[in-house]
Image: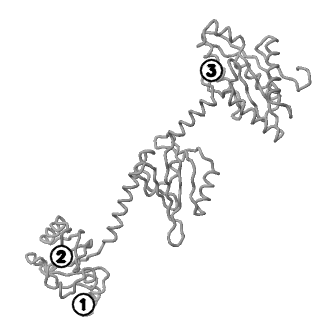
Amino acid sequence: MLQQKLFEAAFMQSWNALVITDADLSAGCRVQFANPAFLAMTGYSLDELRGRSLRMLQGPATDQSVIAQLRACLKDGRFFEGSTTNYRKDGSDYIVRWNVSPIHDATGAVTHFVSAQEDISELARVERTNRLLARALDATSDLVMLTDARSRIIFVNKAFEDATGYPLPVIRGKTAAILKSGEHDDAFYAAMYRTLASGRDFRAKFVNRRRDGSLFHVEQTISTIFDDAGRATHHISVSKDVSQQVEREQALWRAATKDKLTGLYNRYQGEKMLRDCVVKAQAEAEPLSLIIADVDYFKRINDHFGHLAGDRVLTEIARILQGAVRSQDAVIRWGGEEFVIVLADCPIADAVELASRIRARVQAYRDGEIGSVTLSLGVAQFDPGETIEALIARADAALYDAKRAGRDRLAVAPKPGKALI
């Protein structure tokens, strides 16, 4: 008796909508009992339901293929689970998800069916909205990535997959660090984390790495998503691929600053870099040295072997010069067969040693057609207060002293007002 009361209380007080029908398939399985949750969901009273088939809840939008599956399961006495559209007493529709279990007697015959049902209209609406949002995100050409608060990837759109080569199933659960290219330093990421932690958007140009290892450039905005309690729960990143724009800008920059033949800085850019180095040397009291190098007898090379051979020599010498200097030094094709090397934070003794090394390397070079090639070099150290023109003139004078002394050698310019050494 106690057990029966417990079962009855559980049935009547269950949060889920529960209904029990008989097993008479020819009559449509008529309602025997329904709990308050089921009555509230359908809008019918128990008296209105008892003895009637639940077919009364079906309507125009009810999926008949689901109903056919239901009938097949009931006929075979099997468990059923599905969802479709039902209708309340007032005619309004709702989406129901329900399961039906057969109840057997002592002989194993099915005597009743018990069904647990749930109104999932709101859940279905949210799912439809989410699908719509996903389609909308896939329709945009911008790259969209959603991560949790620990930067683990939850969602990326189709544009992201196409641009990076990473399908969502491959990177779901991985961190956004999978895109790191190594082009940004720790300070860049520290600034990003500080900005996001403050609740502000972080906007910057990123250089990211695709799945195939190639790099691409994006203008990226990262925003933090907070819950109702103000806790950061997710980050959303929206990026625009600007690789083509960056490539065009870099091509224009190369055209404006680099010598087409040798790839060295051209004279226009070289003069600008020299001015910047002079300003820095003046402000910080750092030594600044200048080397001017000229290919010996270059006109003879062009006259005897042709301009293609001359271009080949200039290209090879440019490679030797670039390989001899430090990363912070600037190698410039000043014009024709003349090169200038700007050595920031470099005293004259170090500049002379470098010039000697360059002369030796060029002397050791052999062109298959021309044979040996030599350089003459002039070296000068910037004197505080000196003009750029005066510095260049002193280095140039030293260069011509080296040529007059027999070529394939270097000369050092004296300080202003002193004799040549």
Q: Amino acid type of disc 2?
A: Pro
Q: Residue at x 29, y 75 (%)?
A: 118
Q: Residue 205's spot in the image, x, y percent?
A: 56, 47
User: Looking at the image, is 263 positioned above or below residue 101?
Assistant: above
Q: Amino acid type of disc 1?
A: Gln
N-term mark: 1 or 2:
1
User: Looking at the image, is 88 positioned above or below residue 294?
Assistant: below
Residue 121 seen in render: yes
Which disc number belongs to residue 379? none
Under circle 3, the secondary element is helix
The span from disc 1 to disc 2 (Cα, nearest Å) is 19 Å
Q: Residue 5's spot in the image, x, y percent?
A: 26, 91
The span from disc 3 to disc 2 (Cα, nearest Å) is 88 Å
N-term mark: 3 or 2:
2
Q: Which residue is mark 3?
A: 315
Residue nearest the viewer, comparing 131 with 328 = 131
Q: Amino acid type of disc 3?
A: Thr
Image side of residue 110 versus residue 416, left or right: left
Q: Which residue is mark 2?
A: 102
Evaluate if marks 1 and 3 touch, with contact meaning CB atoms under 8 Å apart.
Answer: no
Which disc number belongs to residue 4? 1
Evaluate if marks 3 and 2 touch, with contact meaning CB atoms under 8 Å apart.
Answer: no
> Which mark's residue is nearer the viewer, 3 or 2?
3
Q: Residue at x 66, y 28 (%)?
A: 265
Q: Outermost residue, right direction?
A: 418
The span from disc 1 to disc 3 (Cα, nearest Å) is 99 Å
Under circle 1, the secondary element is helix
Under circle 2, the secondary element is strand
Q: Residue at x 21, y 74 (%)?
A: 100
Label 1: how many Cα within 10 Å (few below 14, some 14–19, many 20+) = few
Image side of residue 283 versus residue 131, left or right: right
